[in-house]
Amino acid sequence: MSLPFLTNSPPLHPSVETNSVLTGNFAPVDKTPPTECLVVEGELPHSIHGVYIRNGPNPQHQPLGPHHLFEGDGMLHSILLSQGRAIFCSRYVKTYKYKLDHDAGFPMIPNFLSGFNGLGDVGRGIVALGRAMTGQISLTKGFGLANTSLKFFCNTLFAMVETDLPYRIRITEEGDIKTIGRHDFDGKAPVNMTAHPKMDEETGEVFAFRCFPVVPYLTYFRFDSNGCKEKDVPIFSINSPTYVHDFGITEHYAIFPDIVLEMAPMDMIMLQGMPVKCWPNQVPHIGIINRYATSDSEMRWFEVPGFNALHMSNAWEDDQSGIIIVATNALKIENSHNLDKVHFSLEKLRIDMKTGEITRSVFSKRSLELGSPNVSYAVAFRSYGGSCFGGEVLFVGMDTGDEIECDEDDGFVVSYVHNEKENESRLVMDAKSSTLDIVAAVKLPGTVPYGFHGIFLGQKELQMM
C-alpha cells in the first residue's frame, strides 16, 4: 500500500511536476488490442509488408512524486501493414518494474531521473531500499523501463533503455505484441547497455557501450555475428561521468561524443533535483577508436567547441582519411531539464584522421531531433499542417522482391502524427518526391502519445523471430 505521509514535497520545477508533464498528448493512454484501422486518405501500398513499431513512455500509475517525461513505463505502438490493410496495437513492455508496480497497484520503485526534491522523495527511496533488503524487490532483475528504442539484432526484436538490459519482444501474426523477457546474453552482458547499439549489416556484428556513474564511466563492447559478447573495453580516458546517449560506427571506427552533461547522483541524494549536471564552460570532445580495439590506448580525442551531440544520425569514412559525422547539436544545453528551451541544430562534421583538422557545417537551422534518414539522401521537407506534430520518421524501402532492382531511396517515410486540435492520431506515409507527397493516412483507434524511437520490420525479419 502507498504511504500518504511520504507524498508531500516542496514546489517542483515544471519539467518534473506531474500535472505539467502528463498533459495533452503526453498523457498516458490505455493499451489497445489488435484493431483494424480505416484508411482515410490515399491507399496503402501493396509493396509494403511488415510492422512499424514506436516506443515511448506511458506511466501505468499516477506518479507519487516528481515525474520526468522520460520516466514512464515503456509502451509499444505497432501497426501491421499487409495487402493494403493496417492492424494497430498498443501494449506495455512487461518489464520487472512494470510487473512489480502492476501487482502492487502503485509505483514500488520511485523515479530517479526526476531527482529527490524533498523529504517525501527521500522517504519513498528509503522504503524501496527496505523492500529490496527484505527481498520484496530484486535489484538483480533490473528496474529499467524499456521505453526508449527498438532494435533488431541476433534475429530478435529488443525494447531498450540505457539504464537496464533489453527486453525481448515478439509480434504475432495477428499483430499483437508479446514481451518474452529480459535478455542478458547468456549472463555475459553488463547490468545495462545503450539504447542505441549499432549493427553492421555486412558482418552481422553489433557494437554497443554502457554509461555508468562510477569508474569506468564508459565501457565499449561488441557482439559477434552469432550474438556472443566479446571482451569489454573500458574507456579510462574519460575521467568524469559524462552522459553518453548515442554513438557512431563506421567501417573501421567507433565514435563517442563527450558532451558537457554529466551524471550526478550525489545531487539527487543531497536533494538538489535531477541527477544530471551541466558544465557549459567545458569544451566538448569527439572520441574515435578502432572498432576492434582491445584497450582505450587507441582512443583519440578531438576538441569540438560547442558541439553537444545527443543523437548521431549517421557516420562514415571518406577516401581521404576523413570521418564524417551527421548529428544533432543541442544548443543551450544548460536548459536540458526543460527541452522546450533547447534548440537542436542538425550539423555535419569532418575530422581528418591524419591532420586532426575539423570542419563543420550546418545542414538545417530548424530545431530537428530524432532523425532517421535514408543514409544516402536528405533532400525534402514538408509540414504536416497546422496543429499537427510528428515524431521520429523512418524510411521504409519498397519491397518488390529479389528479382526487381530498386533505387536506394525507392520507398516511403513513416511516422505517427498527432492533430492537437482534433485530438486524433494517424499513421502518415510519404512517398519519394521533392515535396514528400502523402500516399496514405490511416486513422488510429486512439491517440499515440509523443514518444521516442521506432523501427520497421519487414516480412523477412518477422519470420526470423
Image (tube, helix red, strand yellow):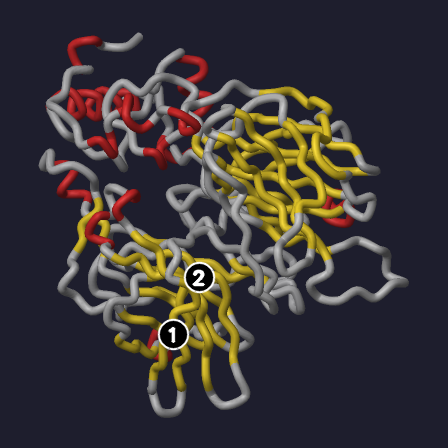
Q: Residue at x 54, y 88 (%)?
A: 319
Is residue 172 or residue 446 the one in the foreground?
446
Q: Residue at x 30, y 33 (%)?
A: 68
170 left or right of 199? right
Residue 361 tag number: 1
Q: Residue at x 54, y 37 (%)?
A: 417
Is residue 202 or residue 76 the one in the foreground?
76
Q: Secondary structure at mark 1?
A: strand
Q: Secondary structure at mark 2?
A: strand
Where residue 233 sits: x, y (%)? 39, 66
> Does residue 465 appear in this view?
no
Across the whole image, how many numbered discs are drawn on residues? 2
User: Which quadrant of the structure image shows residue 311?
Assistant: bottom left
68 left or right of 152? left
Looking at the rendered structure, the kind of residue marked 1 is Ser
Looking at the rendered structure, the kind of residue marked 2 is Met
Where residue 209 sits: x, y (%)? 42, 58
Q: Residue at x 43, y 73 (%)?
A: 294
Image vertical order of residue 189 relative to residue 60, above or below: below
User: Which quadrant of the structure image shows residue 330?
Assistant: bottom left
Quarter of the image with the N terminus is top left
118 left or right of 54? left
Where residue 24 sits: x, y (%)? 40, 25
Query: Extreme right residue here?
Result: 403
Image vertical order of residue 375 relative to residue 446, above or below: below
Residue 312 tag number: 2
